[in-house]
Amino acid sequence: MAVLCPACGREYDVTLFQFGRTISCTCGARVGLEKRIPFTPIGREPRFICDAMLGRLARWLRTLGYDTEYDDAIDDAVLVARGREEHRRVLTRDRALAKAWRVDGILVLEADDPMEQLEEVLRWLGLAFPDRLFTRCTVCNTALEPLDPAEARDRVPEKVHTRHNSFAECPVCDRVYWEGSHAQRMRRRLADGLAEGGVTSGPREPDGGP
Ligand SMILES: [Zn+2]
Ligand SMILES: [Zn+2]
């Protein structure tokens, strides 16, 4: 099956147009197979997938508890397809990517700084800053589970175990999380950064983890 350019009638092979992909015809017109593919969210919590450039933003979003997929080697077609199949909004800095697909739910971020990018995302979706941080593993995106302090004893430094009584663990990668001084600094930096819209440092490793 051939797809015709609406402007000049030139024919293109249908296999070029998966997932709402468009191409630029030699005449300059955009050629696409389908009408815009609408974005359908599931549930109340937004889900995201970040492009390969947005690893630090992905960690911030996970720190805030948002289900955020990230793969530093993902290519554009897979990124857009996964976004569509898993009902995730696609976050990118690449304007050309948004133009190349007729797919809703792609947000092109303006800022270079991860904190400002986070602010853009929250503003775009009208999301408030959550009370609880570290409900999701910042490394593998899995929801954390509470960890009994007795069980945490052998898995965190002794100093930490003495000082804290609330722990969580990632059931997939086994990292242990607790709200230590570093987490509190992160919380402050997030709150300040989002209030002022201008913090330049990004997230580091959270407290805990091997
Ligand atoms: Zn054409
Ligand atoms: Zn994990």
Image: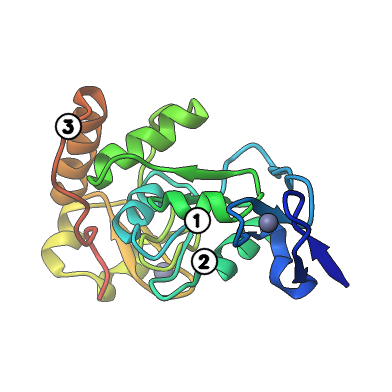
Up the image or down, 142 lies above or below 43; here it is: below
Residue marked by disc 3: 198
Residue closer to the observer: 163 or 72: 72
Name the amino acid type tagged 1.
Leu
Name the amino acid type tagged 2.
Asp
**Residue 107 position within the rendered picture, expressed as x and y whole percent measured from the top left:** 49, 43
Describe the element under mark 1 as helix, strand or loop: helix
Label pair 2/1, CB-CB below 8 angstroms: yes
Q: Is residue 105 visible?
A: yes
Describe the element under mark 3 as helix, strand or loop: loop
**Residue 70 position within the rendered picture, expressed as x and y whole percent measured from the top left:** 44, 64
145 displayed left or right of 41 = left
Q: Residue at x 63, y 60 (%)?
A: 25
Label pair 3/1, CB-CB below 8 angstroms: no
Q: Which badge, 2 or 1, is on the more N-terminal residue?
A: 2
Q: Which badge, 3 or 1, is on the more N-terminal residue?
A: 1
For disc 2, the neighbor class at 10 Å (few under 14, some 14 to 19, many from 20) is some
Quadrant of the rendered structure where residue 152 is? bottom left
Name the amino acid type tagged 3.
Gly
Image depth: mark 2 or mark 3 in front: 2
Q: Residue at x 38, y 71 (%)?
A: 72
On residue 168, the disc is none
Residue marked by disc 1: 97
On residue 76, the disc is 2
**Colouring method of the image:** rainbow
Quadrant of the rendered structure where residue 4 is? bottom right
